[in-house]
Image (cartoon, helix red, strand yellow):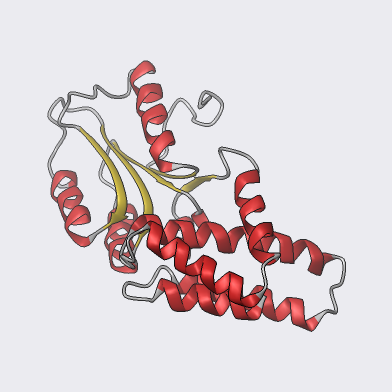
Amino acid sequence: MDFQSLFPKNLYHSYVLEGNPEEVVYSLRSYLEDRGEINKQSQDLSFNLYDSFAIQDIQNIKDWYQNKPTDGKKKICIIGAKFINREVEQTLLKMIEEPTLNSHFFIVVPDASLLLGTILSRVHLIKNLEGVNNEELKRAEDFLNLNLPERLEKVGEILKKFKDNENSGGLRHSAISLINGIERIIYKKWKKDLNNEDLKFVLEELKNCREFLSIPGASVKMILEHVSLII
């Protein structure tokens, strides 16, 4: 992954990178090591990869963040997460809003649109590091081609894959990915027929469903079943 053209010589305080957290965080760490920004053995680096970014996780980062750099230079925090709930985002926002000298945040998420607008307004956003996700689109097309009973059965299969654990960050990421793919397909149809109120309604509902998935305790099963009904 080529980061050379993405980051200036003098780093901004905070970045959000849109891509696969499990891949991007390691490539990013290697890049920052190569350019001399960090030493991965240093206490001034906080390297974090989460399935679901929880309150205790952000508290640990907050405690680390409040300490001064051990070498008097930079503190760098790399966070990769498939899912971040709203409480965590609020704490993260406060740290971004009140940056300490020579500290830098790199937050890697699959879909930046799920983050609070107040976070996105305060960071440098790097979108779509991986280009168009053809696998996501194929999965969405297959889902759209199913009849309603088959869609509901597919929802059950998705849940079983994550052992029916609705708090799983992986499950929420999978649901969001499916909704994103469906939205792209529906949006393309709507652009050819802007007066189609049915398609407009579906797009609005998909947007709402994606936002609901960011709320702790929201039922993934109910949200995906709703998507199955409206499309």
162 to 105, vertically: above or below: below
| Residue drawn at (32%, 51%) of the image | 51
For the C terminus, the quadrant is bottom right
Residue 116: tell me if it is visible.
no
Left or right of 64 in this view: 191: right
| Residue drawn at (56%, 38%) of the image | 129
Between 130 and 68, the one lying in front of the other is 130
Q: Name the quadrant containing residue 55.
A: bottom left
124 to 111, vertically: above or below: above
25 to 203, vertically: above or below: above
The percent coordinates of residue 133 (x first, y second) are 62, 45
Between 88 and 167, the one lying in front of the other is 167
| Residue drawn at (52%, 23%) of the image | 4
Between 152 and 179, the one lying in front of the other is 152
* Count of numbered marks: 0
The percent coordinates of residue 106 (x first, y second) are 37, 41
| Residue drawn at (18%, 52%) of the image | 62
Q: Name the quadrant containing residue 220.
A: bottom left
Left or right of 150 in this view: 25: left
Between 222 and 117, the one lying in front of the other is 222
Q: Name the quadrant containing residue 86.
A: bottom left
Left or right of 15 in this view: 37: left
117 to 36, vertically: above or below: below
Residue 159: tell me if it is visible.
yes
The percent coordinates of residue 34 (x first, y second) are 37, 16
